[in-house]
Image: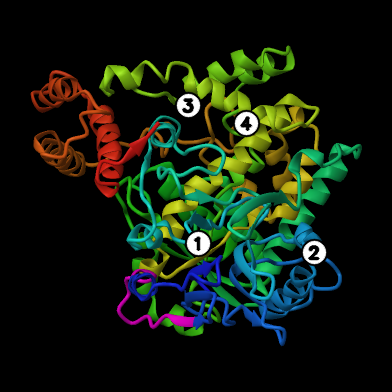
Amino acid sequence: MTILAGIISLNLQAPISDSACEAIRQAISRDPSDQPIVFNNAQAFLAKVDIGAFRQPARRVSSAGTFSMLVGEPLLTCKEAACLERDGQLEFLHNQWDRGNFDGLRTASGTFCAIHHDPGSGTAQLITDRLGLRPLYYVIHKDFLYFSSALRVLEAIQDVPKKMDVTAAMETVGFGYPFSGRTPYADIKVLQACEVVTVQRGRASSSRYFRWDLIPPSRASEEAELKETHYRFQAAVRRRLKGDKTTFAYLSGGLDSRCTVAALRAEGAQVATYNFSLPDTQDQLFGLEFARKIGAVHHEVPTEPGPNWSVVMADAWRTSVEWIKKTERPHLAWTGEGGSVGLGHVYLSPEIVESLYRGDRDGAIEIFLRQQKKGILTRILNPKIAAQFGGHLQSRLRKELDDIRYPDPVRAFHIFLNLNGPHHHLKQHFETIDQHRLEFQLPFYDSEFLEHITGIEARPCLYHEFYVKWLSFFNPAVLAVPWQAYAGHVPSPVSVPEDLPDQWTAPASRSHEQAARNNLLKVSAAMLSASDFPDPLLDKKQLKLMWWATKLRLGDYGYALRAALTYYQYWQTTNGNYEL
């Protein structure tokens, strides 16, 4: 199953409206070839769309009338279920869930979300994976629970209240995503890592079936840790590959996709690799050279910055007709997403690390926000609103870290990064999966792999030091080709040509930049002249000055205009309804 959505009545006297059911049918997929499969009874209406990536429907209805639906793949590692296929694992979990037992999820290593409903007790559970990667949005309104694995479905249901949560919108614009399971809509929440939300008689309660901050520190030697880390990564690839002989993967000039492809080749798989970088860059040339050495069939698709990378891969893959024919599961694309944060420990700079170890967590937070250029741009806000958000991100990040009780403060910060950023980075992929029709295989986000990393002492893992030592366990081709290294992190032992720009400094083409600039000026001008401009939130006078300065090339305030457009998008969706 790829997308699920539904409504559950929390009151036997409250029937589900036909209009809400029809809204789900219409919104669940934008592909006209999709025919949603519907399950309904007196208390529930559920719809699902399946692109066939995993070849099994992943739904379960018991003789007692309880039912479960699953999106993604749990990939259980416990001995009772590790050998089972996806449907068998769902049956194993469903039987536990019927008894109110969620312990089996502690060994889930995959990316998934699920719904379980017991009509007899009127109880529903919403469930997500150990990293919260597969989103599941929900809202309880009046006598109904609405839920969907795509936010756009809930946006399309007229019965679902849509009020802009200004605080969450500020966090989205200023930090990249809102904290604590919030969304830009006041009543719509999203499940967090390891979360089970139980709804009964109109009330919701939350529990966690696993805690990352309770992972015990390891006492093994570094050599043993390196060996175990490689074993777990290879096992993560093997669990997902399931014996497939042919597949396809992203391949950049960095290490994460390189290790993923090397692990696939170690399993004997033929791999078609795809590189979507600018010409004559480290990203392009290192990817090509590694593909040659590892024996992959490589494809280059020069691509300007900023597209939906899932759509770009889907478009390129559809042209590979012969590969599609011989690939066992042609809707599964492999990616190295997550390796740099999970194993490379990026974003934990020396200044942040030293501040944390001397007990200055507030100082570390300030450094992190400054280095990552995160902050609420108060200059474009209505002054009355702006006055309420001084120091907001600092206090919110402090609260998030308060909730992570790991003894090593650097590892605690690392846990925060793992449990928050990845969900945001994959949001667009899952929100548009009905269009690009690709599921991602994400071995660096394997929960068993990351659980092991979390137990290792943090300091030896910083700046890719542990990561680069780990590379010696792979095919020698991994170390034979230079890679793009983060500034301040361990560089490649193979020299990098000085005339090759990396992915962070390679400029886009002038035509691309000009087209993006023209479009930004056009859409922001329309916003500034719109009758529904959000005056209670934004300072129109300030934004007009910024627009003209950008237009006349007196300054570049594109960042401010883009921020304003994000607020305006939520303002329009909510018809100007908002709360602080």
Sequence order check, earlier mark of 4 and 2: 2
The secondary structure type at the circle numbered 4 is helix
Q: Label 2, on which residue?
A: 101
Give how far across and how far down residue 246 sits, in percent.
56, 76
Please state which amino acid type lies under the numbered disc 1: Asp
Predominant SS along the magenta part: loop
Is there a contact, CB below 8 Å, between mark 4 and mark 3? no
Segment tinted magenta in the rendering: 27-38
Of badges 3 and 2, the one in the foreground is 2
Q: CA distance from mark 3 to mark 2?
A: 41 Å
First along the sequence among labels 3 and 2: 2
State if disc 2 and disc 3 touch (CB < 8 Å): no
Callout 3 secondary element: loop
> Dot 3 corresponds to which residue?
372
Q: Secondary structure at mark 2?
A: loop
Q: Nearer the viewer, mark 4 or mark 2?
A: 2
Q: CA distance from mark 4 to mark 2?
A: 28 Å
- Sequence-wise, which precedes: disc 4 or disc 1? 1
Which residue was labeled with disc 1?
143
> Alpha carbon of mark 4 to alpha carbon of mark 1: how far?
32 Å
The residue singled out by tag 4 in the image is 400
Q: Amino acid at mark 4?
A: Glu
